[in-house]
Image: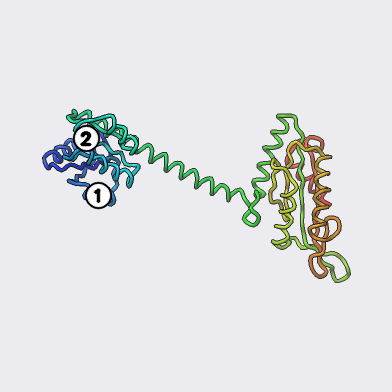
Amino acid sequence: MGEGKILIVDDDGNTRAAYKDLFIGCGFEAAVAENENQALELLRSESFQAVLLDLRVSNNVLLPIAERMKKEFPKVFISMMLIDSTPALMKRAIKAGIDDYQVKPILPMRLIDVIQKGILRYTLEEENFQLKKMVAELQERQKWIMHDLETGVFNSQYFSERLDMEVKRAKRHEHWLSLLLCDMARSSQGVEGNEETSASPPSSEILELLKVLSGNVRNVDIISRYNTGFAIILPETTTEGSFILCNRLKRTLADTFEGSGSRSDCGSNRRLNVRFGVATYPVDSHLPRKLIKIAEDRLQ
């Protein structure tokens, strides 16, 4: 039997009652209204999946009523009961987005079938809408789960997962793959003239370093946060290619921070240390974790 909630709009009391009994007898929830204003009030206060519109007015009056309902409640299935049908009326109804129209008289079970299919369509569309909304929310949440809040690039957890994936891809296609680690720390002069290193450079310098990195890599390269600096996965890049990039980054950093090499003045008795380490698949290792370890050991 049927299910769902229908609003019956009919200005004849006997017909209205007969429709209600028919739909309730077939398992639907049913409410009634005797005119457009009552119908709109009910639609605004309750949730309906379908409207059966049967008013003793001409088609030219009935259609605008259906159009107004459809405009305010576009998801609700609306079926009109017409006195007759013309090509012009059909064209206008389709243009207005009216879901269904039936020419009287109509068999009761035919009407039940039409409304049931309309409610099913409404339900599927609503479920599809909610699923899309859920997917969008999950994607947005996933975006922040994968990204570092301070810099907006991928976080270290994503870096580990992505490096595993890229190594497998390089192996499958017999391509080169390089990993470039970029480590940054603030250094100050100790009491006896020795350098003391702080592991946490200011956010402004981290973002400035990221700007330099982003401006010198390709779209296919993947920048992620790693320790106090960044890791860059370089697909289809040889050791030579990664060293070329490394040297270009050092020159750009020197210009950016007004220092020499990859070091620069950053305040009284303080310097910014940027170190680079490179490892390449397959010459250095076939294992993602080993590539990271090799790149870390080569930081200089």
Q: For the residue labelled by badge 2, is the local secondary structure a helix, a strand or a loop? A: strand
Q: Quadrant of residue 287?
A: top right
- Residues 271 and 38: in front is 38
Q: For the residues marked 1 and 2, what is the alpha-carbon distance in whole angstroms?
A: 20 Å
Quarter of image, res 11: top left
Q: Is residue 241 above or below residue 189?
A: above
Which residue in the protein does label 1 denote?
42
As shown in the figure, which amino acid type bears the numbered disc 2? Met
- Percent from the top left, x then y, of residue 258? 82, 61
Residue 235, x across and y down, in percent: 73, 38
- Foreground disc of the pair 1, 2: 2
- Tell me which amino acid carries mark 1: Leu
- Residue at image point 83% right, 59% down: 263
Of all residues shown, which one is farthest toward the right? Answer: 193
Seen in the image, is 159 located left or right of residue 140? right
Residue 238 x %, y %: 80, 37
Q: Quadrant of residue 24?
A: top left
Q: Is residue 277 left or right of residue 83?
A: right
Horizontal arrangement in the rendering, residue 125 relative to residue 248 (left or right): left
Residue that label 2 marks: 81
Q: Nearer the viewer, residue 287 or 32?
A: 32
Closer to the chain start, of discs 1 and 2, is 1
Of 257 and 298, nearer the camera is 257
